[in-house]
Amino acid sequence: MTSWKLTAFADKPVIRAALVAQEDAFDWDHEVVLTGFELADHRPDDWRLDAYFPRKPTKADKAMVAALFEEGAPELIVEKLPDEDWLVLSQQGVEPIHAGCFHIHTPDYPPSDAPDVRSFLIPASQAFGTGQHETTAGCLAMLTHMKAQGVIARNVADIGTGTGLLAFAALHLWPHTKATASDIDDVCVGVVEFNAAENAIPIGAGPGALTMVVADGMEDALLQARGPYDLLIANILAGPLVELAPDFAASVPPGGHVLLAGLLETQEGKVRAAYRKAGFRLAARLVNGDWSILWLRKRRLCDR
């Protein structure tokens, strides 16, 4: 597959502002994938933005990316990528991570032999969520914390599942839960089913098994029929999280839980405000890098 990339270099606040602007851009072409990151550990304020295209960028494409910068875009460097899947290439050779009670590794590395640690093999794939990103790792750590705090999950949904990893983690922590994973991208069905087989995760409709659904948010008959969910996980983006707050509230009973990620720490206020309005209160939060991970609990009638 031939892909192209536009790259811009700027200070951290400029790149982060561009990433936030992309979330609010209603006319954004969702075939274009945007990433931003620091250049090196010893240069934390020097960042780059990469925009990946499935085609050679046109003038309109360049203008779309340039419009994300409020005070004039930095130089946009155009690069044709090899005829290979850029996402697979970007994930090859990544080192394993340890988050909570989980060890996430690619086929290049062995599983962990540490006691009380669950290893998951997540190969480079066509979907995000290998555990390397701060948001995914933060969710794994928070899920471990939730279990340690006595949370009981009998019915779990992972919205925007990508590789299926967070649903797998929930099934490990609560082995008898009924788990549902959903994603808007139908390519994730094959990815999740493959990863489930690699990690001995049963596919099915009953307790201890995973059901995969292709859905935009909560708009799916099967996803709605399998609710309500006493744990709903969503590692997506701040904008969709805010929009989905009422739907999530309708899908989680009083006393139930949501785990939200994919939001920058600077976006946390508007996300928490949306969920406070929808009837949730903060149970715990952690910050991993620039990203916030939020555990919220649905208020009961007796709660003040």
Image (tube, rainbow, N blue to C red):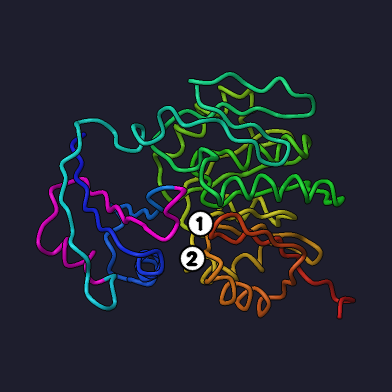
Name the amino acid, label 1. Answer: Ile
Write the residue at 63% across / 73% down. 272
Residue 155 position, x and y percent, is 73, 48
The stretch of residues the image draws in magenta is 41-67
Q: CA distance from mark 1 to mark 2?
A: 7 Å
Q: Quadrant of the C terminus?
A: bottom right
Residue 210 position, x and y percent, is 63, 36
Residue 223 position, x and y percent, is 58, 52
| 278 relative to 61, above or below | below
Residue marked by disc 2: 240
Residue 236 position, x and y percent, is 51, 56
Neighbor class of circle 2 (other Cα within 10 Å; few <14, some 14-19, many 20+) is some
Contact (CB < 8 A) between labels 1 and 2?
yes
Was residue 54 drawn as part of the magenta stretch in this picture?
yes
Q: Quadrant of the N terminus?
A: top left
Was residue 120 drawn as part of the magenta stretch in this picture?
no
Q: Nearer the viewer, residue 31 or 17?
A: 17
Write the residue at 81% across / 64% down. 255
User: Which quarter of the figure has residue 75?
Assistant: bottom left
Q: Secondary structure at mark 1?
A: loop
Neighbor class of circle 1 (other Cα within 10 Å; few <14, some 14-19, many 20+) is some
Q: Secondary structure at mark 2?
A: helix
Residue marked by disc 1: 236
Name the amino acid, label 2. Answer: Pro
Q: Nearer the viewer, residue 211 or 23?
A: 23
Q: Determine the residue located farthest toward the right in the rendered image.
A: 302
